Image (cartoon, helix red, strand yellow):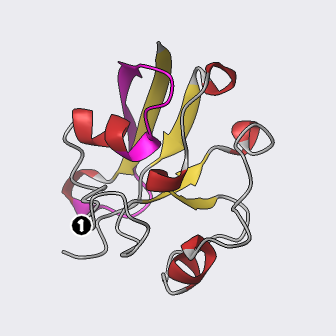
Amino acid sequence: MVKVFFSKKIRPGGQKGTSITTSKRVSVPEGTTLMEAARKLDLKEVPAMCGGNCACGTCHVYIDEFYLDKVPPIRACSPEIDLLQEKESFDNKRSRLSCQIKLTKELNGLLVHLLDDELL
């Protein structure tokens, strides 16, 4: 089993400057995608409208900087980078589509930062 932690900063009452970090943890079998792990927790920030087909970009997450060298790079033939670059919240280093990351034992303990749902 691979443990994944999903983290999100929230601002109570919409106040500026004050934030609380919340997190949820899930354990899934190796080979599960990061998107499927998020769906197991029913995270609204990862709607994954295309069901994991790398066609919509709605499973966009940030990989924690500590894990960047452990997550496989974006494949050259994948539309992932094009979908990510369309996002206002695109971060050249940390942005990934969670449907494109298969979880392995090397990623055990992976920390993922959630974005606000860009569709709502």
As rendered, which of 72 and 77 lies closer to the eye? 77
Quadrant location, the C terminus: bottom left
Quadrant in the rendering for residue 26: top left
As rendered, which of 15 and 113 lies closer to the eye? 113
Up the image or down, 52 lies above or below 80; here it is above
Name the residue at 73% across, 62% down.
93
As rendered, which of 80 and 16 lies closer to the eye? 80
Which residue has dot 1 on it?
A: 49
Q: Is residue 20 left or right of residue 86?
A: left
Name the residue at 50% across, 18% down.
2
As rendered, which of 101 and 43 lies closer to the eye? 101
> Where's residue 22, x and y in %?
36, 35
Taking the magenta stretch, the answer to whether it contains residue 23 is yes
Taking the magenta stretch, the answer to whether it contains residue 74 is no
Q: In the orientation shown, which residue stands out farthest toward the bottom?
A: 86
Q: Give, as a single range, the part of the protein colored magenta.
A: 14-35
The three-letter amino acid code for the residue at tag 1 is: Met
How many callouts does the rendering have?
1
